[in-house]
Image (cartoon, rainbow, N blue to C red):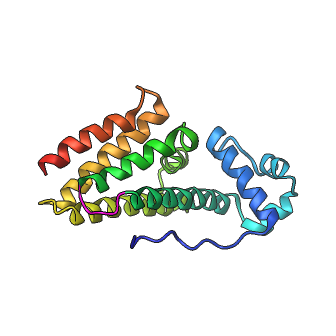
Amino acid sequence: MPHPVPELAPLTPGGRRVLDAASQLFYERGIHAVGVDTIAEAAGVTKKTLYDRFGSKEALVVAYLQHRDARWREHVAQQLALVPEPGIDRVLAIFDAAISWSDANSPKGCSAINARAEIADGTDDHPVFPEVSRQKLWLLGVFEELCTEAGLRDPRASAQAMMLLYEGAIVTVGMTTFAEPFAVARRWAAALLAQA
């Protein structure tokens, strides 16, 4: 797949424990609700170790989002490998990936959307914002590439429709508005793609 997982800096064992603890705490409780003292305690390190490894809480939040994104991209690549031939089924493989990912990894919805919503303070200079945009633009690009490979008449418009269905489903997962939103989104995606 021409969209490689971003190269992430290697972590020391202490840095890995910090990131693992922060990732769990940020996702379960929220970014603002979790302080560096709580993260350091959960990781079994000092605050100095946390700051030595990441520099700031903001940088740790970005690392959390990047590492979750890397795991998601690997999952998408594995799902796409199951459907190697171009076509509608390959586009729908993104929804299949989301179905198999969301229960275990995203019961509260998208970590990037949640972080963006939590940090929204009227300015866009927080380092989380470009990271969230990068992740969402990547997925839109994947959809467009898959729609192009499938030979759809307007791959960009089809990709945008797929992105809207995907994003609506991931928000619905977090809101628990109704059961199995990715399955519903996949059905509508299949219907749209069949006419595209």
The answer to whether residue 171 is above or below residue 155 is above
User: Residue at 28% across / 49% down in the picture?
Assistant: 162
Q: Quadrant of the N terminus?
A: bottom left
The answer to whether residue 67 is above or below residue 173 is below
Q: Main secondary structure of the magenta part?
A: loop
Residue 71 percent coordinates (x, y): 56, 58
User: Residue at 50% across / 42% down in the picture?
Assistant: 102
- Whether residue 111 appears in this view of the structure is yes
User: Residue at 54% across / 42% down in the picture?
Assistant: 106
The answer to whether residue 78 is above or below residue 186 is below
Residue 184 percent coordinates (x, y): 32, 34
Residue 188 percent coordinates (x, y): 24, 38
- Whether residue 126 appears in this view of the structure is no
Residue 117 percent coordinates (x, y): 49, 45
Left or right of 154, for residue 170:
right
Magenta span includes 84? yes
Residue 191 location, quadrant: top left
Magenta span includes 180? no
Left or right of 187, for residue 122:
right
Pick out the residue farthest to the top. 178
Total number of numbered labels? 0
Span shown in magenta: 83-87
Left or right of 62, for residue 196:
left
Residue 108 location, quadrant: top right
Q: Looking at this view, is 83 or 17 the one in front? A: 83
Q: Looking at this view, is 12 or 65 the one in front? A: 12
Q: Looking at this view, is 6 or 133 the one in front? A: 6
Left or right of 17, for residue 100:
left
